[in-house]
Image: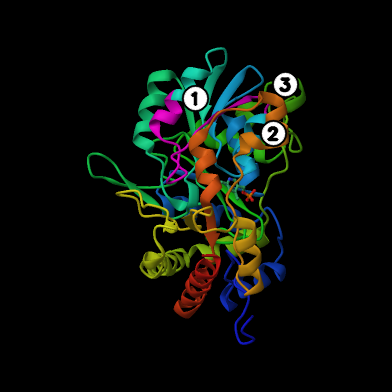
Amino acid sequence: MTDPGSRFLPYGRHQIDEDDIAAVVSVLRSDSLTGGPLVAEFEQAFAERVGARFAVACANGTAGLHLAAMALGLGPDDAAIVPTLTFLATANAARYVGAEVVFADVDPATGLMRPEDLQDAHAKAVNRKIRAVIPVHLNGQCVDMEAVAGFAGRNGLRIIEDACHAIGATYRTRSGDEVRVGACRHSDMTVFSLHPVKTIAMGEGGVVTTNDPDLHAALLRLRNHGMVREASRFVQRDEAFDADGQPNPWYYEMPEPGYNYRASEIHCALGLSQLRKLDRFLARRRELANLYDRMLAPLTPLLRPIPRIAGCASGWHLYVVQMDFPSAKTTRATLMRRLLGKGIGTQVHYLPVHRQPYYRSRYGNALLPGADAYYASCLSLPLFPAMSNGEVERVVAALADELAQAE
Ligand SMILES: *Cc1c(COP(=O)(O)O)cnc(C)c1O
């Protein structure tokens, strides 16, 4: 029974306004479609927004994670700890540079890696040279970065935050400071995605932030084929300089191969325009999440919103509930199909990555019960800034209806 007057509600959706369109069109009419001034302008605005010294725009969040792994110099002798409850790209970034992945468990309630999960993963992987950890701010809520940084400091680990879900999120330290995700207060680098399903859109796009000038230089170089253009860094003097000691105007060097992971002017124009709306989008996402929380309360204990982390202002990439499907006498697949029939899109974030065929065949069947429990009961409901309060009511009514029918 789809109400003909009601539109389909995806679990997430971008919001593009006329000024975003105008920003992109003006690039199309300009002299540079890529490699122009908007890349740096976008990077500067992004760095300022999250409170980092540097931001590097790139092709997508996955490229950002790969660049970060390369910038740390991770390689085949190394391993990185990755929470298993994440998108594929977090773990794959380690594999791209040949490093092994050590999967950490997560809190079954929030899906976030806890300090004890990090400690367990580290203790279990005695025969590996663990050099990094990639905490994931799942759904937009923040990992206890202060604890992660403490552990990493004691054990010589570098830290890359995967904040693809958490643009605009903040967390509170034990001394009461509010820290913006991306400021890298407790990490080496933070990686964001601007895929349209995330909070702000570039089409495809990503950003890596850092406060470290050397990492910044490495990210810029690796994003652009590994090319070096500063004469002071040339090592092949006879190739680089003419008889007068002037650098040859065409010359560049490549100390190690990088990639073409650049973001174009077109993408950065959209990113810059969308960044100006971030606060508005976040406020609306928070309102909708609060409304869901209130409206879903009568459906407990069969269905519960994910508990909120104290001191964290979520980026609200996703609105996730946990459902006791067996007690509700249904399955997740059945419920999802029935909701789809009512024009309501839902999704599951995520099958724990250690259960993917590739990682199973590489590392065997890991025992990560927190992640398995989270996965078994999670369901992402529609959440996007253009959603109306009435549409939240529609989703909640459909859920209530399904639960009542399944009894
Ligand atoms: C989306 C996402 C990525 C990858 O970002 P893309 O821009 O799609 O490449 C990485 N990690 C997490 C947790 C994500 O949700």
Disc 1 marks which residue? 121
Report the residue that reaches farthest toward the bottom. Answer: 5
> Which comes before the other along the chain, label 1 or label 3?
1
**Could you say which disc has been placed on residue 226 in the image?**
2
Residue 31 within the segment the image draws in magenta: no
> Which comes before the other along the chain, label 2 or label 3?
2
Q: How busy is the neighbourhood of tag 3: few (under 14 within 10 Å), some, or many (20 plus)?
A: few
Q: How is the image coloured?
A: rainbow
> Which comes before the other along the chain, label 2 or label 1?
1
Q: CA distance from mark 1 to mark 3?
A: 44 Å
Closer-to-camera residue (136/6): 6
Quadrant position of residue 338 = bottom right
Whether the residue under disc 1 has CB within 8 Å of ligand 1:
no
Front of the two marks 2 and 3: 2
Q: CA distance from mark 2 to mark 3?
A: 16 Å
Q: How busy is the neighbourhood of tag 1: few (under 14 within 10 Å), some, or many (20 plus)?
A: some
Say which element carries label 1.
Answer: helix
Front of the two marks 1 and 3: 1
Quadrant of image for the N terminus: bottom right
Front of the two marks 2 and 1: 1
Report the residue that reaches farthest toward the left. Answer: 175
Query: Of the residues shown, which amino acid type is indicated by label 3?
Result: Gln
Task: From the viewer's perspective, tell me whether residue 229 is left or right of residue 141.
Answer: right
Q: Is residue 238 above or below residue 370?
A: above
Say which element carries label 3.
Answer: loop
x 55%, y 47%: residue:
376
Q: Which residues are magenta?
A: 96-119
x 47%, y 68%: residue:
277
**Could you say which disc has been placed on residue 236 in the image?**
3
Q: Is residue 61 visible?
A: yes
Residue 266: x and y in percent read 67, 62
